Image: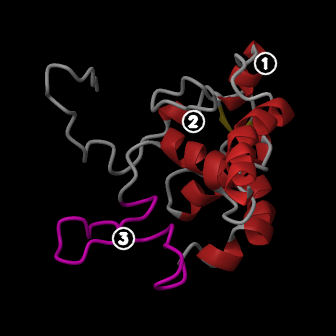
Amino acid sequence: MHRVLLLLLLLLIPVLVQAQYELGRPATSKEIQAADITVMPDGRGLPVGQGNAVAGEPIYKSRCAVCHGPKGEGRKGEYPALVGGVGTLATPKPVKTVGSYWPFATTVWDHINRAMPFNTPHILPPNDVYAVTAFILHLNGIVSREEQLTEKTLPKVAMPNRNGFVPDSRPDIKAHR
């Protein structure tokens, strides 16, 4: 008798879950748009916004410095450095940071937007993400403190390692530089 009740319960759980959470229904266009946060290297997908290192510094200090250090030096073995490493990629001990390794400033923005702060990802509004991105790029000597980053200017930022990656040449991959 207990086995029959257990089997019946196991069979009903998916039905109850589906009824509770509306699983299996088509997503609305509003739900799809909210989930589409992809940003491409050329800037497609960046939202309207702006920020500079001056505005980004206090946000960085309150949200990022606890893990990445006040000057982006990281915490060895725990959280990566964001600054430094220029000229080390071809050495036996490369230091991969935003300034030495990342090829696109838009990718920095996208990573901050999607995954940071680590304990509460995707909570920063676009202007704060632009500002923190500007501050990190400023720490790396890539942009000035006052340079305003927007959805139009960010894709034009020339990262030091922008030519350090080789596009995939397989014929079924549409990679363009």
Residue 62 quadrant:
bottom right
Q: Is residue 51 visible?
A: no
Q: Quadrant of the C terminus?
A: top left
Residue at label 1? 30
Front tag of 3 and 1: 1
Using the numbered discs, state the Cα–Cα distance from disc 3 to disc 2 in whole angstroms: 22 Å
Mark 1 belongs to which amino acid? Lys
Contact, mark 3 vs mark 2 (Cβ under 8 Å): no
Residue at label 3? 85
Where 119 sits versus 28, above or below?
below
Magenta span includes 84: yes
Using the numbered discs, state the Cα–Cα distance from disc 1 to disc 2 in whole angstroms: 27 Å
Please, which residue is most extreme toward the front here?
1
Locate residue 76 relative to residue 17 in the image: left or right: left
Could you say which is closer to the camera, residue 110 or residue 141?
A: 110
Secondary structure type for disc 3: loop
Using the numbered discs, state the Cα–Cα distance from disc 3 to disc 1 in whole angstroms: 42 Å
Q: Residue at x 60, y 74 (%)?
A: 68
Secondary structure type for disc 1: helix
Q: Is residue 140 visible?
A: yes
Mark closer to the chain start, 1 or 2: 1
Mark 3 belongs to which amino acid? Gly
Residue at label 2? 154
Where 77 sits versus 82, above or below?
below
**For mark 1, does the 10 Å Cα neighbourhood hold few (<14), some (14 to 19), or many (20 or more) residues?**
few
Residue 60 quadrant:
bottom right
Magenta span includes 136: no
Q: Which range is magenta?
A: 74-100
Mark closer to the chain start, 3 or 2: 3
Q: Residue at x 70, y 78 (%)?
A: 66
